[in-house]
Image (cartoon, rainbow, N blue to C red):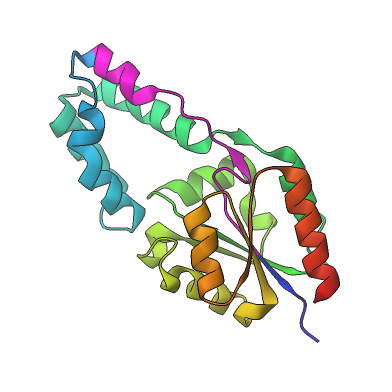
Amino acid sequence: MQLPCLIVDIGGVLEITPHTGWPERWERRLGLPEGAVEERMADVWAAGMVGGIDEPGVSAQLTKRLGLDGEQLSALLDDLWADYLGSPNQQMIDYLAGLRSRCRIAILSNSFVGAREREEAAYGFAGLTDHLVYSHEIGVQKPDPRAFAAAVTALAAAPADCLFIDDHAPNVEGARAVGLHAHLFTGNADAIARIERHLAEH
């Protein structure tokens, strides 16, 4: 008998990621209009989420579009990744670490090129899961059905065997639409209770 499956988001679930305001700080520092970072970089951010650009390409576009020198680029990237990585939701990370004998676990993340290496260095997610599925590596993002299919396939599971945890309602709805059980993350206690219920039922 196969173990039940759990598929978990990263940002907002395993990482606590409040907006740090780094674009606004850099707009002030560079004398740019409000909203300029997002406006000038929106297509680059979108490409980075689905593997349409590599890290050197991102750096080149930041330098070109924001008028950065080498020192500024390095500092801006430090701010960008500090915002992206946030801080660990240690209770959820520790809980997942204790589940390995009870279920198969995958991470499914709408990610940005370079995230795997940085999150592994910061949080060691590979040791928590059987599979890491990043949007910038598979070329599609949640709630695209293909993203959920990639995680389910990685686990060699059926959708009905899987519980998906995410803090973004459209992703939860998308998971349910393709046959997964799904829970909207609003806090650790409710999420852990829902996971325990899933394990007991499967």
Q: Which residue, as the protein is rendered here, is positioned at the far bottom? A: 1
Q: Position of residue 84 (x, y in %)?
A: 46, 37
Q: How many marks?
A: 0
Quadrant for the N terminus in the image: bottom right
Q: Residue at x 31, y 50 (%)?
A: 48
- Picture quadrant where residue 119 is located: top right
Apparent side of residue 23 relative to residue 195 in the rendered image (left or right) = left
The residue under the point 26% across, 42% down is 58
Residue at the image position 33 percent from the left and 58 percent from the top: 50
Residue 24: percent from left, percent from top: 32, 20
Along the line of sight, which residue is nearer the eye, 54 or 140? Answer: 140
Q: Is residue 53 above or below residue 3?
A: above
Tell me if residue 25 is in the magenta stretch.
yes
Q: Locate residue 90 relative to residue 84 in the image: left or right.
A: right
Q: Nearer the viewer, residue 97 or 180?
A: 180
Q: Over which residues does the magenta segment extend?
A: 7-29
Image quadrant in which you'd find residue 63: top left
48 within the magenta span:
no
Q: Report x, y in % for residue 40.
A: 18, 35
Res. 78 visible in picture: yes
- The residue nearer to you, when weighing 41 against 196, is 196
Q: For the C terminus, which image quadrant?
A: bottom right
Q: Is residue 102 visible?
A: no
